[in-house]
Image (cartoon, rainbow, N blue to C red):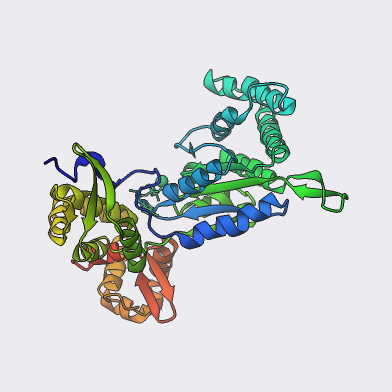
Amino acid sequence: MADVRTVLNNPFEPGSGAVPPIWVGRDDELADISSRLVPRRRAGLFERGRTYLGDPGLGKSVLVNRIAEERARAGDLVAGPLRMALGRDPLAALADVLAPLVPAGERVAGRVTSALERVREVGLLGARVGMTVADEDRYASLSDLVEGLAVLASETDRLLVIRVDEVQNLSGAGLSQLLTILGDALEMQMPATDVTGNRVMEYAPVVVLLSGLPAFPERAAAAGATFSRRFATTYLDPFTDDEVRAALAFAFADGYEVLTDDGPALVHLEVAAREALVEVCLGDPFLFQLAGAAAWDASPGAVLTAADVRTGWDRVRREVGAHVRQRTAGLTELQLSVLTAAARADGEQANGTTLAQAVGRRASSDIGSTLQALVTKRLLALGPDGYRVVSRAVARSLAGG
Ligand SMILES: Nc1ncnc2c1ncn2[C@@H]1O[C@H](COP(=O)(O)OP(=O)(O)OP(=O)(O)O)[C@@H](O)[C@H]1O
Ligand SMILES: [Mg+2]
């Protein structure tokens, strides 16, 4: 008999930005898109773009990719994905992901193709051979291109979806130009006929999705872009235990279908194994995939057991440590001590005075700027009864669990 669970049919994908086969949570974010943003934009109403921010591994790319995949399946005009590498020319990068959306035949949308040609001429070529092209020309051409694509989308009754990932890598003039172009696209209006036959102005069917690390809004504000008014920002949180539990229960409800050398088979998840996965990942999306993948590979049987979860988790211990340490890298000694003191509060909220005294100071005000910095970095959250460590995985590691 062939192995049932193999590395080739392992559905867990740690470290991938692709939409994972076993999906957890994000119900609010997905509902916001499908029941607010999409219907409003399709109706010609204004709706802000969306920005998803969060620490590495919290699932920003995966969320935006899932939204984009759903829109593409619905027939919309979906650009990208555009990942802003550090130092990359943002306008050229945007032109690159928009270019494939331009229909080949000139006759379909003459306006779009001529706009693209101009961008190619003055922008891309210029950027590639290192010529300096007047920035205004590139900017105007790219605006034309976005506008042309928005017109095309509107005429064919579709949405134009533009997504930019790793936005924290943008800065300075490039950042402000890109945000202005995207902001203008969101503000763009076009004439339409309403149900009673009257001519009205409607907002273009444009959807803009940004994602990146939490440092981004500060950069955007510094670049003077009107970012905060044009985009609604969501900070992604770790999953709740119930979300992880529900996702696993759903995926394995009738057994998880896999292909083996002997043909199709079903993999079952012991309830104890499900609970063990919930417990080890502590709601951290990356750790969920990491723990799942390791448990899957721990033995080849048709039933994934709690022992498999423990064996797998032992094997990835180092990687877990590295992932969690990355979250606290770059903190000052005092910041790390305060965070550790909050972690030792064991899920309870700790007030400022308690934390101050734990690090040898007297009053909350003595560590005021430190607390503020930890909140800004989204490592601590301030609740009604004090501070708590946002990531339970980080808290466990700091508390020595
Ligand atoms: N909703 C989800 N359900 C299941 N797994 C998820 C979900 N969101 C993220 N993951 C998993 O978490 C890991 C990190 O996801 P992703 O790459 O999207 O994070 P990110 O926030 O974009 O990180 P980075 O800042 O490093 O780019 C991946 O392995 C992914 O499969
Ligand atoms: Mg990412």
Note whether 301 is above or below 95 in the view shown.
below
Query: Where in the figure is residue 308, as x and y percent of width and height?
Result: 14, 55
Q: Position of residue 189 (x, y in %)?
A: 76, 46
Residue 306 found in image quarter: bottom left
What residue do we see at 60% from left, 31% from top? Answer: 101
User: In front: 133, or 21?
Assistant: 21
Residue drawn at x 73%, y 22% as measured from the top left: 107
Image quarter of residue 35? bottom right
Q: In the picture, which quadrant includes the C terminus?
A: bottom left
Residue 163 in view here:
no
Picture mark count: 0
Q: Nearer the viewer, residue 78 or 234?
A: 78
Report the quarter where the N terminus lies: top left
- Residue 257 image position (x, y, % from top left): 29, 48
Residue at 24% x, 50% y: name it.
266
Q: Position of residue 237 (x, y in %)?
A: 41, 62
Q: Residue at (53%, 48%) from the top-left corner?
A: 210
Q: Is residue 161 visible?
A: yes
Vertical side of 271 occupied by 69: above or below: above
The quadrant in which residue 55 appears is bottom left
- Apparent side of residue 64 relative to residue 198 in the rendered image (left or right): left
Q: Residue furthest right?
A: 198
Left or right of residue 103, residue 28 in this image: left
Question: Depth check: 88 or 284 in front?
Answer: 284
Q: Nearer the viewer, residue 255 or 193?
A: 255
